[in-house]
Every structure is written in structure tokens, then in C-alpha cells.
Amino acid sequence: LMEILKIPEDEPIESKWISRAIDDAQAKVEGFNFDARSHLLEYDDVMNKHREIFYKKRREILENPSPALKEKILEILEKAGFSQKDFEAKEKEVGSEKFLEAIRGLCLKIFDFYWISHLEEMEHLRDKVSLRAYGQLDPLVEYKNEGFKLFRNLLSAIELTIAQTISKIQIAKEPIRPQPVVLPSIPKKKVGRNDPCPCGKINSKTGKPMKYKKCCWPKYG
């Protein structure tokens, strides 16, 4: 530009037209950056609302005492069409406190699994709606509307998974351990000296059993 206008490089630029053009360009850049930052904040606001609702529900599971937790679980089961009596039977069999603490841990794992999945879906949605500006659609409005549907599906999926998982829980029964059998002792019959020897030895000469006194009695008698 300096060469075209034949202005020496060391000569200061004092043209009002050039100064105004530079100011206008700078204002446009700053305006563009401001709009970009504003849109980023608006997108973040959508996720912040999701996060606020999600963690409120998660805290209800984490912090509620056992009676309130049980009431919440029974509500979820009823809403999903599962048996509350089956839940209470399992609770009675295992023990209320032990069973409800196991259910609490199970629910928290389900919450966390679906939240990570939701974050990934919202990130994908943000990239997808940015292209809709070419179709004269407001990407932010599209992001809010579709994000709301995804979040509503998230909450429904969490409750349904909790209900399904609880209904499938099988309580393992402890195996019946066989008690040791104590057999009554049989008193041993005392062998007489003239009785056949218990060892069963046969007299080779007579072919009859050896008498105890002539066989094993000298050893054990």
C-alpha cells in the first residue's frame, strides 16, 4: 500500500481515510470476537442448566437418609411399572440398611455413566448445529431445543435403568453347610481266650480257625 501510494516508509501516516479504515477494521474484529465470546457463554449456559438439574437429582440419591431414599426408589419403580413388593421383599431378606446402601451405590454408578454419555452427545450436537447457519437457522436455538430433548431422554433413561436393574437383582442364598455326623461308638466285644482269633487265621492242621489264646492273644491279651 505504501508503494502504491508512493509514500516513504519513514513518513508517518496521517491520512484520515486510512486511519478511519483501520479503526473500522479493528472495531469489526473486536465485535466479531465479542459475538464469539457471547455465543460461547450462551452455549455454556445451556450446559450449566443441565448440570444444575442433574446434580440436584444425584445429590438426592447420595445425601438422602435411607427412608427418603427408599421412598424415591419406590416412586421410580412405580413410574416404570415395576413391582414395589418385590423390592420390599428383597430389602427384608437382606436387611433394610444394608440393602438400601447397596442400592444407593448402584444408582450413583448409573447416574455417572449416563452423564458422561450426555456430555459427549452435547459436544457432538454443538458441532452439528453450527452447520445449520447455512440453512438460515439459528445454531444456538437449535442447540437449546435439541439439547433439551437429549437431557429429557437422559433423565428417563436413568430412571428406567435403575428400575430394570433393581428388578433383576437376585439375592444369593447361603449354601446349607452339612453338619458333621457323629456316629455312636459301638462297644467292642471282648474276645475270649478260646474264641476264634479276630485276625481270621486258620489252623493248617485242623482247617479250623485258630483260637485266640494260640494266635494273637500273646501279643494283645
Image (cartoon, grey):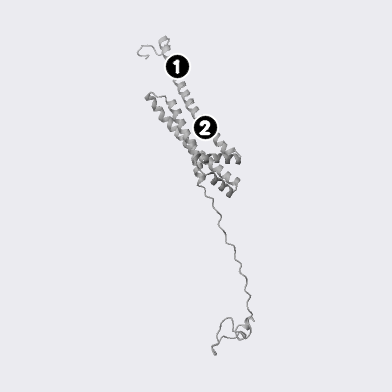
Q: Residue type at mark 1?
A: Ala
Q: In the picture, residue 67 is in which quadrant?
A: top right
Q: Position of residue 149 (x, y in %)?
A: 45, 32
Which residue is more in the foreground, 32 or 173? 173
Q: Position of residue 118 (x, y in %)?
A: 47, 35
Q: In the picture, residue 17 is in which quadrant?
A: top left
Secondary-structure class at tag 1: helix
Q: Is 33 located above or below residue 163 in the figure?
A: above
Q: Residue at x 40, y 30 (%)?
A: 128
Indicate which disc residue 27 carries: 1
Give the foreground label among 1 and 2.
2
Which residue is more in the foreground, 127 or 69? 69
Q: Earlier in the sequence, mark 1 or mark 2?
A: 1
Q: Residue furthest bottom?
A: 205
Indicate which disc residue 51 carries: 2
Secondary-structure class at tag 2: helix
Q: Position of residue 104 (x, y in %)?
A: 56, 42
Q: Residue type at mark 2?
A: Arg
**Cβ atoms at labels 1 and 2 below 8 Å apart:** no
